[in-house]
Image (cartoon, grey):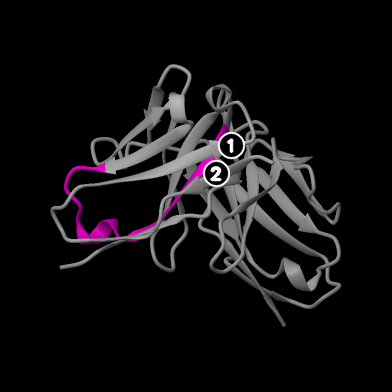
Amino acid sequence: EVQLVQSGAEVKKPGESLKISCKGSGYIFTSYWIGWVRQMPGKGLEWMGIIYPHDSDTRYSPSFQGQVTISADKSISTAYLQWISLKASDTAMYYCARGFLTGSNNWFDPWGQGTLVTVSS
Amino acid sequence: DIQLTQSPSFLSASVGDRVTITCRASQGISSYLAWYQQKPGKAPKLLIYAASTLQSGVPSRFSGSGSGTEFTLTISSLQPEDFATYYCQQGITFGQGTRLEIK
């Protein structure tokens, strides 16, 4: 069974750093993209970025470029989403998902269970 | 940037109804569209990709159509478990969502 398991909920203060993880299993991790999607409380889905673990080719949405860093460690089939300095506005649920990319077409399946990040002083 | 506009944003329907959700793109996107279902407190689930290809395991009452700038997701006969929020996606853009509730 293809599965993505994300790290647990985090509570942080503004200005702190954070790295959350997403571990893939049940498939060849390096043969598929991994994407990250943000969902702020009560809001819709926002595409953040995507990485190809085989060669770490990474693409960001312009809205998130420079705000977060996406990385992957293919030796442990794990992708990461990282912040250097969190803001209260980073409070959200963050999902990782296996990505399919063909030219301009992309979709995600399956999705991880989500990691809730709360940033509050 | 491509914008995706879903309509309606909110839909009230009954079990057994046929419902259609529309996703309009601000420019032509060929058949590059996916649809997801999200239930409260759960991760999204892929229903359809490439505009009309049903993901494995998704009930056949779900169907997608369209190309260019106008796309539809149709549920032929609503079941109780179908009440959820639905999103379309193309590239780096998601639609704003359509919340489907029980009448």
Q: Which amino acid type is marked by label 2?
A: Leu
For the view shown, which residue lies furthest in the front direction? A76
The residue where tag 1 is placed is A25
Quadrant the C terminus of chain A occupies:
bottom left
Q: Position of residue A44 (x, y in %)?
A: 47, 59
Q: State the image quarter where residue B103 is shown.
A: bottom right
- Secondary structure, mark 2, is strand
The answer to which of A34 and B90 lies nearer the viewer is A34
Q: Position of residue B31 (x, y in %)?
A: 68, 33
Q: Left or right: where does residue A9 sit relative to residue A99? A: left
Which chain contains the residue that carries disc 2? A
User: At 83% from the left edge and 54% from the top edge, which residue is drawn?
Assistant: B59
Question: x and y percent of residue B73 in the render?
Answer: 73, 53
Category of crowding for the residue at label 1, using alpha-carbon neighbours closer than 10 angstroms: few (below 14), some (14–19), many (at least 20) = some
Residue at the spot 52% in from the left edge and 35% down from the top edge: B91
Q: Amino acid at mark 1?
A: Ser
Instruction: Magenta stretch: give its range.
Output: A83-99
Q: Which residue is mark 2?
A: A4
Chain of the residue on which disc 1 is drawn: A
Taking depth in this image into account, of B46 and A62 the one nearest to the observer is B46
Q: Position of A44 compared to A99: left or right?
A: left
Nearer to us of marks 2 and 1 is: 1
Q: Secondary structure at mark 1?
A: strand
Mark 2 crowd level (few <14, some 14–19, many ≥20, 10 Å Cα): many
Verify CB contact (< 8 Å) between mark 2 and mark 1: yes
* Residue A71 in which image quadrant: top left
Q: Is residue A39 left or right of residue A87?
A: right
Q: CA distance from mark 2 to mark 1?
A: 7 Å
Q: Is residue A71 visible?
A: yes
